[in-house]
Amino acid sequence: MNKATVTLTDNRSGQSYEYDIMDGTRGPSVVDLRSFFADTGMFTYDPGYTSTASCSSQITFIDGAKGELRYRGIPIEKLATEHSYLETCYLLLNGELPSKEALQDFDLELRHRAYIHENLRLLFDAFPNNAHPMATLSATITALASFHKEHLTLDNDADYHTMASRLLAKMPTIAAFAYRHSLGIPFIQPDIDLSFTKNFLTMMRAYPGGKMHLGPNGHEEIKEVEVRALDTIFTLHADHEQNASTTVVRGVASTGAHPYVAISSGIAALWGRAHGGANESVIAQLEMIGSVENVEKYIARAKDPDDDFRLMGFGHRVYKNFDPRAKILKTLQDELKEELQLDSRLMEIAGKIEEIALRDEYFVSRNLYPNIDFYTGIILTALQIPKNMFTPIFVIGRTVGWITQWIEFKKDPQSKIARPRQLYTGA
Ligand code: CMC
């Protein structure tokens, strides 16, 4: 059988060029244009990479038209309801779900590695009061690279594993410290007896000495339902193929920089409100809208081409159908409504926005559906997580995805330094 190809003809000269069509296991075919410039002397033009596959990958698959998301072939719905975040991390890093023993070892390893060097802790003092935790988090992860210079050269799986588990384990500690520093309250050290997610919630919410909030009935401990909800949120954020921050991580990886510096750059990229920063903006927007009566007015602003107001938590580059992560969170939100006393006023406003947008011609014709960030905020608020920690929560969940993509990039013989070209229109 002949190889599948496409023929491109330069209509100025009539000259034709043939390019191979590559097929993955799923998803659209790809035209192999690697020799395009050498053949034609022309570049391709694709700002925002809307038509460009920047790498081949075996980690995450998204079908945006169907609203489907899989990590290592397993549907997100199954992972979010039947498996823990740590199992999901193991799956992403190793390509398969862990056995009971492997999970136990992985869990213990992360508990041991959750502590940070005392000198790294001193770094927090350099940040101003009220520093946004995302700024502190990104800078501290860069600093962490200088504590583990050995990770600059990794050449076997054991080294990759140590580099990955160290960062996964320390990220919640650093995020919680960044938050507590922003309030000027003492840090709570990790507790080796607590699970990954409960440990993070404790480092966020405990009083000095590790005791929980004192309510009318004594110490109000963290509830299992809260731990499960946050664990699910981490799982839903764990990876999302070649999104903006992952592309940044791979780009920095391509220059040979330290892996933690690449992740720190990913954190910076995630902070923007078109990406991970949207979760913080959604709640701020719901609070600004204030009541269901005002929803129509803001929907009209979102539709006005002369107004740059956008509905935060709506739209996605890849999903042209409901974001499957948003569907899971909407169900979770409904389940937890009573148990966690979710903010009914914000839920009502969000419900009204969704109801109008899902049948409004502007949103329907542009395939603008609620994305994951539309639902995280209301649940996180009920877990007593403040707004400026929503994006750091995204960071904690996504760290495993960034590391897995970083490792895949390093092991791929096709990887090259990221160096796009331009259409020069200047003087
Ligand atoms: N509200 C109102 N109009 C919108 C919105 C929105 N949230 N999103 C897109 N549009 C319109 C946009 O104005 C444009 O209209 P027109 O064709 O008339 O010019 C059309 O829809 C296409 O938008 P685009 O900006 O070209 O689409 P994109 O694929 O480049 O951007 C996006 C995707 C997520 C940046 C964008 O939808 C957006 O800014 N959404 C709000 C921020 C948000 O919720 N981000 C979280 C994304 S999910 C979490 C993550 O993975 O980071």
Image (cartoon, helix red, strand yellow):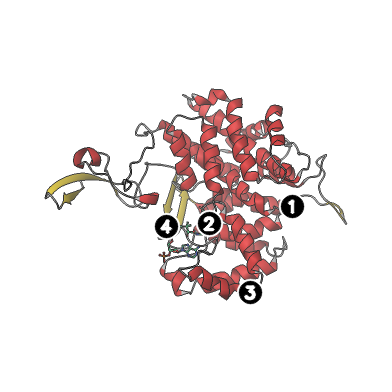
Q: Is residue 235 above or below residue 177?
A: below
Instruction: Give whichever of discs 1 and 2 has the lower sequence position.
Output: 1
Query: Is residue 126 shown to the viewer in this render?
Result: yes
Residue 292 bears which disc, if any?
A: 3
State the residue position of label 4.
64
Q: What is the crowding at mark 1: few (fewer than 14 residues within 10 Å), some, or many (at least 20)?
A: few
Instruction: Give whichever of discs 3 and 4 has the lower sequence position.
Output: 4
Residue at the left extreme, as displayed = 14
Image location (x, y in percent) of residue 394: 58, 48
State the residue position of label 2.
325
Residue at coordinates 60% horizontally, 70% vertically from top-left?
A: 351
Quarter of the image for the N terminus: give it.
Answer: top left
Residue at coordinates 74% horizontally, 36% vertically from top-left?
A: 189
Quarter of the image for the C terminus: give it.
Answer: top left
Amino acid type, mark 4: Gly
Distance Cα–Cα, label 1 vs label 4: 35 Å
In the image, 106 versus 310, the foreground residue is: 310
State the residue position of label 1.
223
Q: What is the crowding at mark 3: few (fewer than 14 residues within 10 Å), some, or many (at least 20)?
A: some
Amino acid type, mark 1: Lys
